Structures are given as C-alpha cells and as structure tokens.
Image (cartoon, rainbow, N blue to C red):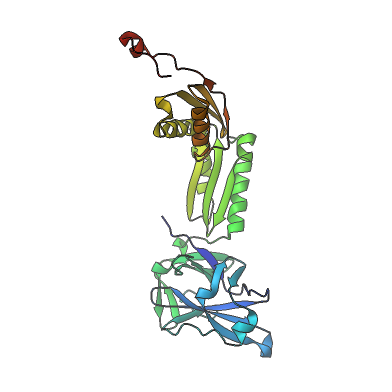
C-alpha cells in the first residue's frame, strides 16, 4: 500500500496564524528526502524578502496552501531559526536532466514528513515521479526511469470530478445507489464509501474508479446488502445475542431492519446497538418480537425446554 501523502506545490500560499500569506518557493531535504526547512518569500521585484523556516511549523498542506503555526512578523523578523543540518534545496529553478521539464512541487507524507514523489511539469502535463527513481548529480536531479513510463499527476479536485462523472453516467449503478456514494480524494488516493445492492455492482463501481487517470490507490469501503447482512450476523453472534435470541437482518442500501424473536427488551436494544455499529450501516429499525424462542428440533426430540 502506498504511503499517504499530500501535495506541497511551489508557488502556493504560505498562510500564517495572523491570516497573512506569502509564497512557498523551495524545500530543503536531507538524504532520506525528509523535508527539514521550507523557503518563504514575500514582495515583488526588488522588494522580495526571503526566509527559511523549519518544516515542523507546517500544520497541514494541500494543493493550494501550506498552513504555518507562526505569524508573518515572527517569520520575517527571523525569530524562528531553520534546522541546522545538511540538506539540499529544491525549487522551480532546480535543474532537471530531462529536457523541457520543470519542478512543480512534491508529495509529502504528513506522518514521516518525507517526500514520496516529485511533481514535474513536462510540456502541458504534470508527472509524478517517486523519489526512488530520482538521484542527485550535483545540483541536478536525474530520473532513472524513461519519461513515457512516468504516471501522470492530477489534482485531487480533477480526480474527484472524473470519479463522480464515471459513476454518475454509468448505467449499472442505479440512481438511489449513486446518491448514497461518498468519495474522498487526498494525495491522489481515492476512498470509496457507500452502499449498493449487489456484489456485482460493488465490483463494477470499483473497476470504474480504478481506471481514473492520476489515481495512485483505490481504497474501497463499499458494502453490498448481502455482505452487510453477513457482517451484522457475525457481530450479533460475537456479542452473544444469537445464543438467547433468533435475530436476522435485512438491508436495503444500508438501511437495516432486524427481524426475529428475543426474550427481553434489553436484548433487542443490544441487538440494535450492535447492528448500528457495523461499518456500512446507515440506520437500524427493529421489528424483533418479544417472547420465548420456539424450541429447536433437537430440543423437541430431547424434551429439553427452549431458552426463555
């Protein structure tokens, strides 16, 4: 599974806690590609100010901005020193050993603070190159893979729009199923949530999304009704409810109705609570009757009473 990462784009806004903003112009990375410092600029032409800040100040970042936990005054008064460690600066001016290319940014893991991929512009396309396929030759970045094998990088917004378009215009996915789908896109990773009626529809939707250009990973949490009923039954058994009751679930796009018989209202409430906690369940309605369970055939043969 690919490591989660978020785009840090050169030239995007650097937003301070006092709501002022400047521009991100460079990253400083160590030999393991961990981002140690970032360079921030403000002003234009002859009045440009630049400052280096520790990347630890970055609380979060996206395609449009990096949020910093300091004020602009604190940053440009140089009250916050950068990390003093050997590093390599990379920016839009960093030379690339690929004709016609230019560095546009990087995908950086929020957990490790390491660059997982560089984003490179080649003509009108943005390409995503893993750092495992990049080496430094002096100040020049050299790719160890052929350009025609490099996957395209697309913004999360473009990927999400493509996903929605494919699902919306598909004839297999019914309108009521489509309305229950949820898409989350972060760092070119798409998470697909929601409910469908059949396993075949689930697999079809996953196949459609997996074909979207620029997607690095699909994480599907789609649930079809039959699988959801099986999952609920397993949790009811695990909670011990099925030892004293006969309860079964029927799902319609995650809206679950419980049927059966139970000896006590408290057990019915427990069955409802356990069912509602199962991933993929949207609502639970109980039609479980209160009363003793009918004796099983084995109990009738042995003469033992049913559980009550």
Q: Is residue 135 above or below residue 86?
A: above
Residue 112 placement (x, y as % from top left): 43, 67
Of residues 146 and 53, the one nearer the viewer is: 53
Residue occupying image coordinates x 68% and y 89%: 47
- Figure quadrant of the N terminus: bottom left
- The answer to whether residue 100 shows anywhere in this view is no
Looking at the picture, does residue 294 appear above or below residue 96? above
* For residue 183, above or below residue 58: above
Locate residue 286, reporting x and y percent: 56, 27
Q: Residue at x 52, y 20 (%)?
A: 290
Q: Quadrant of the C terminus?
A: top left
Left or right: where does residue 298 sit relative to residue 8? left
Q: Is residue 239 left or right of residue 211?
A: left
Query: Residue 307: x and y, percent?
Result: 40, 19
> In the orientation shown, which residue stands out farthest toward the bottom?
46
Which residue is the extreme one toward the left? 302
Q: How many marks?
A: 0
Residue for point 68% across, 76% down: 20
Q: Nearer the viewer, residue 266 or 60?
A: 266
Q: Observer-nearest residue: 282 or 26?
A: 282
Please indicate, yes or no, whether residue 229 appears anywhere in the rendered image. Answer: yes
The quarter of the picture where residue 59 lies is: bottom right
Residue 235 horizontal/vertical position (percent):
43, 34
């Amino acid at each position: 599974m690919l490591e989660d990462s978020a785009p840090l784009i050169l030239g995007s806004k650097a937003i301070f806690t006092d709501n002022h903003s400047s521009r991100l112009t460079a990253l400083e990375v160590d030999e393991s590609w961990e981002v140690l410092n970032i360079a921030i600029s403000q002003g234009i032409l002859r009045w440009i100010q630049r400052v280096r800040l520790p990347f630890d100040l970055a609380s979060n970042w996206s395609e449009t901005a990096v949020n910093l936990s300091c004020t602009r005054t604190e940053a440009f008064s140089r009250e916050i020193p950068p990390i003093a460690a050997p590093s390599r600066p990379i920016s839009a001016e960093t030379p690339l050993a690929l004709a016609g290319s230019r560095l546009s940014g990087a995908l950086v893991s929020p957990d490790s603070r390491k660059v997982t991929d560089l984003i490179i512009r080649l003509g009108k396309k943005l390409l995503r190159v893993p750092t495992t396929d990049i080496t430094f030759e002096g100040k020049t970045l050299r790719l160890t893979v052929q350009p025609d094998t490099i996957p395209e990088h697309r913004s999360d917004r473009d990927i999400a729009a493509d996903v929605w378009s494919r699902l919306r215009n598909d004839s297999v996915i019914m309108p009521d199923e489509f309305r229950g789908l949820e898409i989350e896109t972060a760092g070119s990773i798409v998470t697909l949530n929601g409910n469908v009626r059949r396993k075949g529809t689930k697999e079809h939707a996953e196949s459609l999304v997996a074909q979207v250009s620029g997607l690095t990973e699909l994480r599907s949490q789609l649930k079809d009704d039959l699988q959801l009923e099986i999952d609920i039954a397993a949790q009811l058994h695990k909670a011990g409810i099925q030892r004293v009751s006969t309860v079964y679930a029927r799902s319609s796009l995650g809206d679950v109705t419980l049927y059966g018989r139970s000896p006590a209202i408290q057990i019915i409430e427990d069955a409802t609570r356990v069912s509602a906690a199962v991933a993929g369940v949207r609502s639970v309605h109980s039609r479980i009757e209160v009363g003793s369970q009918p004796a099983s055939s084995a109990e009738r043969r042995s003469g033992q009473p049913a559980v009550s």
